[in-house]
Image (cartoon, helix red, strand yellow):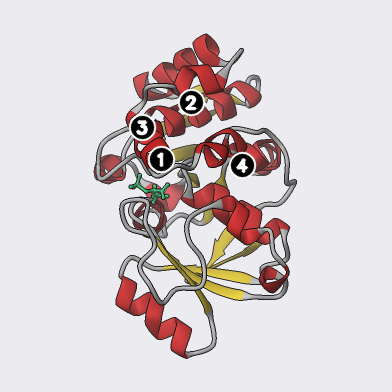
Amino acid sequence: MRKIDVCLSPELIHLYDVPSLAVVVVDIFRATSCMVTAFAHGAKEIIPVEKMDLCSAYGAKGYLTSAERNGVTPAGFDFDNSPFSYQVDKVKGAKICVTTTNGTVAIRKSRKSPALYVGAFLNISRVAEALKKWEGDALIVCAGWKGKPNLEDTLFAGALIDLLHGSYHVADDAAMMALGTYKEASANLMQAVKGSSHVNRLLGLGIEKDISFCLERDVYPVLPGLRGNKLVLK
Ligand SMILES: O=C(O)[C@H](CS(=O)(=O)O)OP(=O)(O)O
């Protein structure tokens, strides 16, 4: 049977043979939740970049721009890092360039995967369907926070592995840990993330509604994936 593993932080990605694996990149709070929301509202493509000046350069070429560092958006960009900001008409048909603290770093480090998908609770069943069709092994890459693992991305990894029961074997301890953590928390994810470092940071910014929205399951049946340097709908 195929194997599925979890990379708990992009800092650990050198331990995995990414070019041979389908990869699901996840940054629940909030980059991949925003990307899924943007595609569900009609975005045509999203270019993830690591540097803010490159994001601005895409703006000069006609892209809408989204930037965030430490939860805050500097002046001069079109979107912040809230999924609610993408639920607007101007997203329809838009080409968007995005840079965030953690999520876009995880995507760049995973880009050699032959099948890279963007995952969130918002589209988790759609991602599971794609992995069921993939014929090889798979890896869930958690964006974490500045190189450290985090709870919410680990919970997503466990939830996805749970959905793939019978299709994939758990490959290693990180995947076992994610699955066990999710099973313990699944009855009330909001309760489970209370007190976690990322939730505390976001609460400090006054954005509690983002937290509960990003934990909702299967709101948007869309599957963003990487083609070249762009995320597009698969
Ligand atoms: O805006 C977010 O949710 C985070 C900000 S921070 O890293 O927690 O300060 O960025 P993301 O890249 O989406 O993790």
Which residue is under mark 2?
Answer: 155
- Point out the tag, 3 or 4, that comes first from the N-terminus: 4
Q: Secondary structure at mark 2?
A: helix
Ligand 1 lies under 8 Å from the Cβ of mark 2: no
Q: Nearer the viewer, residue 219 or 72?
A: 72
Between circles 3 and 4, the one closer to the viewer is 3
The answer for how far apart the CA atoms under marks 4 and 2 are is 24 Å
- Point out the tag, 4 or 1, that comes first from the N-terminus: 4
Between circles 4 and 2, the one closer to the viewer is 2
**Quarter residue 92 falls in:** bottom right
The answer for how far apart the CA atoms under marks 1 and 3 are is 6 Å
Badge 2 density bin: few <14, some 14–19, many ≥20, Cα 10 Å? many
Residue type at tag 4: Glu
Horizontal relation, residue 166 to residue 110: left or right: right
Badge 1 density bin: few <14, some 14–19, many ≥20, Cα 10 Å? some
Which residue is under mark 1?
Answer: 202
Q: Are marks 4 and 2 in contact (CB under 8 Å)?
A: no
Residue type at tag 3: Asn
Q: Secondary structure at mark 1?
A: helix
Q: Secondary structure at mark 4?
A: loop
Horizontal relation, residue 3 to residue 125: left or right: left
Ligand 1 lies under 8 Å from the Cβ of mark 1: yes
- Point out the tag, 1 or 2, that comes first from the N-terminus: 2
Badge 4 density bin: few <14, some 14–19, many ≥20, Cα 10 Å? few
Residue placed at 67% from the left, 44% from the top? 130
